[in-house]
Image (cartoon, coloured by chain):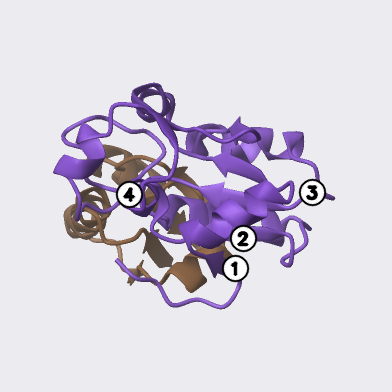
Amino acid sequence: MEYVQSLVNEICPTSSQAWVKRGAILVDVRELNEVEQLAFDVPAVVHIPLSEFEIRYKELAMDKELVIVCRSGSRSLRAAGFLINHGFDPIKVVNMKHGMIRWVQRGFPVKGDISGIVDANAGGCCNHGGKKESGCC
Amino acid sequence: MNIKVLGPGCPKCKTTYNNVLEALKQTGAEAQVEKIEDIEEMMKYNVLTTPVLMIDEVVRIKGRVADIKEIKELLTQ
């Protein structure tokens, strides 16, 4: 699903790679079971599940560039908006559009099993092959 | 009374919305019910986990389906 909004700047996975290379931190808001199955393989990644985000967002440095990521880009968009609403710099906080799905499609580095992503290629944040996910929908 | 159900339109959000309508029917309470699926609108409320049930601009339940019984209790508080 494509969302139209103006609060959060959004970048594609390719641009996210460039951000990471220049020192940005990837903030993965997927739930633990999702990360255990498949993780972003980048040097600087922080995992704060969306279900814990409200209490743990202060762990994030406000002076760093943050690329917020999830499976499809939907939950991460909400998390990025939440950060901006809490005083984070909208220039430094961006959402990665299309999330892990597009990241895998582009062949970017991951650790784990990509079959869940490939099988549910067109799925949104509510489609996890039947797996429960408390932070979503 | 103003009731809002916030969520991106997933099945849990639809269930919550339908439960609100059923709870209103069962209690006979009158309320204006809104379904908010617009992401920008949701972000104004700082919503992270959905669905969210708001009554008179106060978040009462978030991140899970609100069942009919608990909605009825909230309506009669």
Spatial CA distance of label 3 from label 4 is 25 Å
Residue B53 can be seen, yes or no:
no
Task: Kindly identify which residue carries mark 1.
Answer: A8
Q: Amino acid at mark 3?
A: Lys
Q: Label 1 amino acid? A: Val
Tag nearer the camera, 4 or 2: 4
Q: Which residue is mark 4?
A: A101
Q: Is residue A95 left or right of residue B25?
A: right
Q: Work out whether mark 4 precedes mark 2 in sequence or the reverse, and give the earlier one.
A: 2
Determine if marks 4 and 2 fall on one subunit.
yes
| Pointers 2 and 1 in contact (C-beta within 8 Å) | yes
Q: Cα distance, mark 2 to mark 3?
A: 11 Å
Distance between mark 2 and mark 1 Cα atoms? 6 Å
Distance from disc 3 to disc 1, alpha carbons, whole Å, reads 16 Å
Precedes in sequence: disc 2 or disc 3:
3
Query: Of the residues under marks 2 and 1, which one precedes in the sequence?
Result: 1
Horizontal and vertical percent for residue A109?
A: 45, 38
